[in-house]
Image: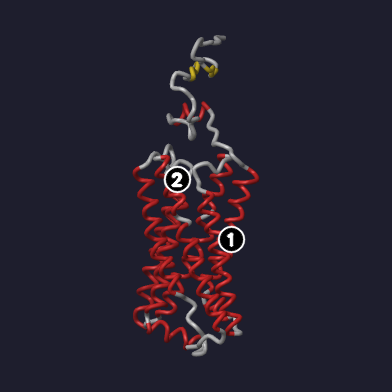
Amino acid sequence: MANWNSIPLEITYEVLGWTAFISWSISFYPQVILNFRRKSVVGLNFDFVVLNLTKHSSYLIYNAALYFSSAIQKQYFEKYGQDQMIPVAANDVAFSIHAVLLTAITLFQIAIYERGSQKISKITIGIVSAVWFFAAVCIFIALPSHSWLWLISIFNSIQVFMTVIKYIPQVFMNFARKSTDGFSIGNILLDFSGGVANYGQMAVQSIDQDSWVNFYGNIGKTLLSLVSIFFDLIFIFQHYVIYPHKKAQVSSKLVEEEGTEPLVKSPDQPESEKCVKLSFNHIITSCRPALAHVIIF
């Protein structure tokens, strides 16, 4: 196993690694706190959370196995060379454990808080079921030959695949609602910082070792950073440029059909100021505290 050639680069590597860990770990809390304060998960896409749990579970299996298993490390060195370094650090394992735990908490919030008409799509259920079935098949394939490195690379590939698709439902949901209300931008900003720090950590290791093996030797970690940064930029653009300070707008017709309250209600609207909807022409008039004006056609 290779050693560090430069102490300053080794220190920089550790600093960037734990910076990524802190940024990514804290990034889960803004959404959890937002859900808790609102007692609602309206605006948070449930498919995103379910896909994210599968993603982080797969990444945890890969990181923990490669970091702790000497047998898998031996297979890694046989494939990439004895002079290479394991591309998984302690902060990677710590992050994965924390990510699975916080994503599970978010999923629990979905189960107990107000969620309106939102639900997990059948497509997402099908994707997650197919992914874990595929993983189970690969385990039985790897058992006879003890192909553990190949097996964890499958889990690494799964987390890359889930990373690519997990953001898409939330992007389209923001677009459909013309709002990012209910989806924490703090989560995205911290996720972006973590992605940049993670990529920088890998670059520092490559510079020290004068080799780029750790990039393609751990393609999952490489793509994780790049894909996360790409979608984070999309969310930032949606929040600050396209839909700044916009609340989700739900038409009265949609509310009537689904039998649900509007996604966002104005907090300063008095209870006495209720809206009366005339079913004949679907005309909505606002009632004022002193006098209610009702227009009838």
Residue projecting furthest to the right:
241
- N-terminal of the pair, mark 1 or mark 2, is 2
Amino acid type at circle 1 is Ile
The relative height of residue 276 versus residue 4 in the rendered view (above or below) is above
Residue 113, quarter of picture = top left
Q: Disc 1 and disc 2: Cα gap in Å?
A: 22 Å
What kind of element bears circle 2? helix
Q: Nearer the viewer, residue 137 or 169?
A: 169
What residue is disc 1 on?
229
* Residue depicted at x 55% and y 65%: 225
Residue at the spot 54% in from the left edge and 73% down from the top edge: 219
The percent coordinates of residue 32 (x first, y second) are: 42, 49
For the point 39% across and 39% down, the residue is: 114
Name the spot of residue 48 as percent of width and height, x first: 47, 52
Q: In the current view of this chain or complex, which residue is farthest to the bottom?
A: 82
Name above or below for residue 293 compared with residue 151. Answer: above
Residue 93 percent location from the top left of the image? 41, 70
Amino acid at circle 2: Leu
Q: Crowdedness of circle 2 by 10 Å Cα count: few (<14), some, many (20+)? A: some
Q: Nearer the viewer, residue 41 or 163?
A: 41
- Disc 1 on helix, strand or loop? helix
Residue labelled with disc 2:
34
